[in-house]
Image (spheres, rainbow, N blue to C red):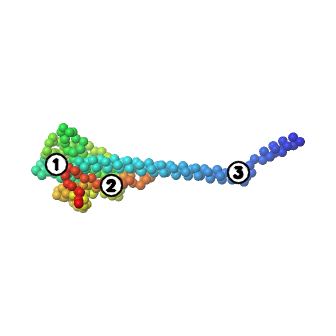
Amino acid sequence: MMRGLRRRLLAAGDRGMTLPEVLVTTMLLGFLSALILGLVSSFSQTFSRDRAAADSTTVAAAGMKELTRVVRSGTELRLLGGGAAPSPVFVEAGANALTMFAYIDTQATSPKPVKVRFSIDAQRRLVETRWAATSTAAPWSFVATGAPTQTRPIARLIPVGADPLFQYLDASNTPLTIPASGFTTDQLRSIAAVRVTLTVQADDTERADPVQIHNAVGIPNRGISRVRP
């Protein structure tokens, strides 16, 4: 009797899984694998997109900080050969480039202004170029335009077709229209503030949308009040 029972149990164990059981198991494993891979892929894409957006935000904030610092330090200067009247703060005021005089990164014992230009280069980077003063007191003179003292990128990458970097405001906060031929000296003198719109796409793969930040920067050294009743 025991031998017969053992043979029946062994026979039942040798049967294994049936074809329907194998198919159902395979389908379940495939479904679970696809679900897990989808979750991992979604998480990876979200993480990459968030990191790209964070990179663009960091780059834009650093570029805006430098722009704000320099523009706020803008100063009218007496230039060598320029007569008794001081030169305007801005030498050039364009939609995507500006050149100006400012007192920044100078020594307290012998302060000297610098001439600074912000522009977009061929690699779509926002570049800061500086020219040091060659004289020790007013009237000031500067290193030749073709021989900058320092050039460095402060933000990348400015997308093609981005909004203009600079808009100029008068004392009443009214935007000034940039003439095709550029501002005249009197028009340059009327600039009381600069509205900056910085658009950055720091991630080359463009996994996240560009980041855009805005700031309106006054020029305290000009002594122009932009507060109106």
User: Where does residue 51 sit, x and y in percent of width and height?
Assistant: 44, 48
Viewer-nearest residue: 73 or 98: 73
Q: Residue at the spot x=21%, y=52% of the render?
A: 90
- Whether 78 is drawn above or below 109: the answer is below
Q: Residue at the spot x=18%, y=50% of the render?
A: 76
Find disc 1 in the rendering and name its residue: 77
Give the number of the mark in front: 1 or 2. Answer: 2
Give the number of the mark in front: 3 or 2. Answer: 2
Find disc 2 in the rendering and name its residue: 214
Question: Mark 1 Cα within 10 Å, few/some/many (few <14, many 20+)?
Answer: some
Residue 1 in view (yes/no): yes
Give the alpha-carbon distance from disc 1 to disc 2, as whole Å. 28 Å
Q: Which residue is outermost to the left?
A: 84
Give the alpha-carbon distance from disc 1 to disc 3, as whole Å. 87 Å
Give the alpha-carbon distance from disc 3 to disc 2, as whole Å. 62 Å
Q: Which quadrant would the N terminus be assigned to in this image? A: top right
Find disc 3 in the rendering and name its residue: 22
Question: Mark 2 Cα within 10 Å, few/some/many (few <14, many 20+)?
Answer: some
> To which quarter of the image does residue 180 belong?
bottom left
Q: How many marks?
A: 3
Which residue type carries mark 1? Leu
Q: Is residue 23 left or right of residue 154?
A: right
Lower position in the chain sequence, tag 1 or tag 2: 1
